[in-house]
Amino acid sequence: MSLRFVTLPGTGLTASALGFGCASLGSRIGRADGLRALAEAHDGGVTWFDVAPPYGAGEAEAILGEFLAGRRASVRVCTKVGLAGPERSGLMRLVYRLGRPLAARFAGLRRRFRAAAATRYRPIALDAAGIAASLDRSLARLRTDHVDVFALHAPSPADTVRDDVVRALEDILTSGKARQVCVAGDLYACRAAAAAGLPYRVLQLADDPETEPLATLRVAAGRPVATVTHSVFGFDGALSRLVARLEADPAAVRRLQAAGYDGPAGQAAARLLIDRAFASNPDGVVLASMFAAPHRRLNLARAALPPNPEAVRLVRDLLGPAGAS
Ligand SMILES: NC(=O)c1ccc[n+]([C@@H]2O[C@H](COP(=O)([O-])OP(=O)(O)OC[C@H]3O[C@@H](n4cnc5c(N)ncnc54)[C@H](OP(=O)(O)O)[C@@H]3O)[C@@H](O)[C@H]2O)c1
């Protein structure tokens, strides 16, 4: 079955409803495994790839650039400006390089690695020259002359509406180096960006199953905006919380089985969460990190199905405030 495709409202961009998130490309995931995963996803129909300068310890854009060679015309690429990699001393760089492969293999260690200050992104001050220069560096690493979407990465709401920032982005649109500009941030920044008269036609945010931000965002926008959502499995430990609920609650298992989500708890929960993500963003793109082959297979299979609104209700009931109590 082929993947569902969407035309993102207000943009003219068409893409697979499932996008590949490259935050771990070059850090947790080495270059060769990463390139293989990207190629397999593309062969399976994925045409949206999301990246940023600090992703993959600064390596993700260059690796994605290798992947893009010969494929550029068939894919959409989003990169960003606004976050830099962590500042590390020489010793910390060594610890990181040696510890990363181990952390990739052990979930507990991975969580500690992520929480360590030495692995956290740093915000960079946005100004017109810096925004333009960052995009030029990204284009060089990606080996392309334009990106489909250029996003402010985790900006403050005030930054998204600042005159000099907006003008810099408009200049980039005029130059053709980006087809669309975007805010990839929290709900407050996305709401500010959705205001009429601003150039942002794409908004990227985590779709928290408990607060369901997309519904309020669309109302606030009052104009067609394209939405790209992420952190389907990782958001606040959604997958592990759902699995824990199923393991503790036979009634919840029966309810999922009746809705067609049967099998081992981990798989039923993963199918339900990705179905929920597609159903809550039916004309947008849902990003997933899917370097592991079983994850890729599952996500691709679900991306071929029509959105299932029942999944939104089920997750709301199982993970929402009532379900959590
Ligand atoms: N502010 C922003 O703009 C922002 C913030 C966060 C994320 N993002 C983008 O969104 C992308 C995805 O976000 P994310 O990495 O936070 O969350 P995610 O896609 O929910 O991934 C979290 C974990 O879930 C695993 N996974 C994927 N499919 C699965 C499945 N079917 N069953 C079980 N586990 C599965 C992934 O493993 P494997 O990868 O090992 O397969 C990964 O370790 C990022 O790579 C990035 O491109 C953007």
Image (cartoon, rainbow, N blue to C red):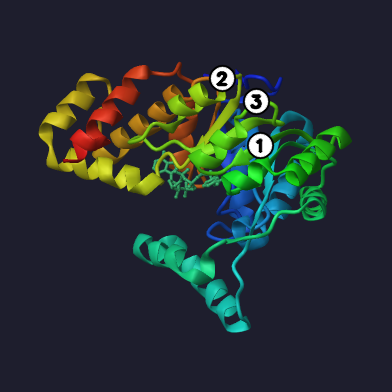
Q: How many marks?
A: 3
In the image, residue 182 lies at what x, y percent? 66, 37
- Evaluate if marks 2 and 3 touch, with contact meaning CB atoms under 8 Å apart: yes
* Residue 264 seen by the camera: no
Occupied quadrant, residue 307: top left
Vertical placement of 314 versus 112: above or below? above
* Residue 292 seen by the camera: yes
Occupied quadrant, residue 243: top left
Q: Estimate how packed mark 1 is, as few (under 14), some (14 to 19) or many (20 or more) residues with alpha carbons within 10 Å.
A: many
- Going by the numbered disc 1, the residue's amino acid type is Cys
Of residue 80 and residue 4, the one placed in the foreground of this image is 80
- Evaluate if marks 1 and 3 touch, with contact meaning CB atoms under 8 Å apart: no
Of residue 78 and residue 61, the one placed in the foreground of this image is 78
Q: Earlier in the sequence, mark 2 or mark 3?
A: 3
Of residue 288 and residue 126, the one placed in the foreground of this image is 126
- Nearer the observer: mark 1 or 2; the answer is 2
In the image, residue 70 lies at what x, y percent? 80, 38
Q: Earlier in the sequence, mark 1 or mark 3?
A: 1
**SS class, disc 1:** strand
Which residue is rendered at x = 60% and y = 28% of the image? 45
**SS class, disc 3:** loop
Residue indicated by mark 3: 196
Side of 46 where 249 appears, left or right: left
Residue indicated by mark 2: 222
- Evaluate if marks 1 and 2 touch, with contact meaning CB atoms under 8 Å apart: no
In the image, residue 288 lies at what x, y percent? 50, 40
Which residue is rendered at x = 68% and y = 55% of the image? 53
Side of 51 where 240 appears, left or right: left
Question: Which quarter of the image is occupied by the C terminus?
Answer: top left
Residue indicated by mark 1: 182
- Going by the numbered disc 2, the residue's amino acid type is Gly
Which residue is rendered at x = 38% and y = 18% of the image? 308
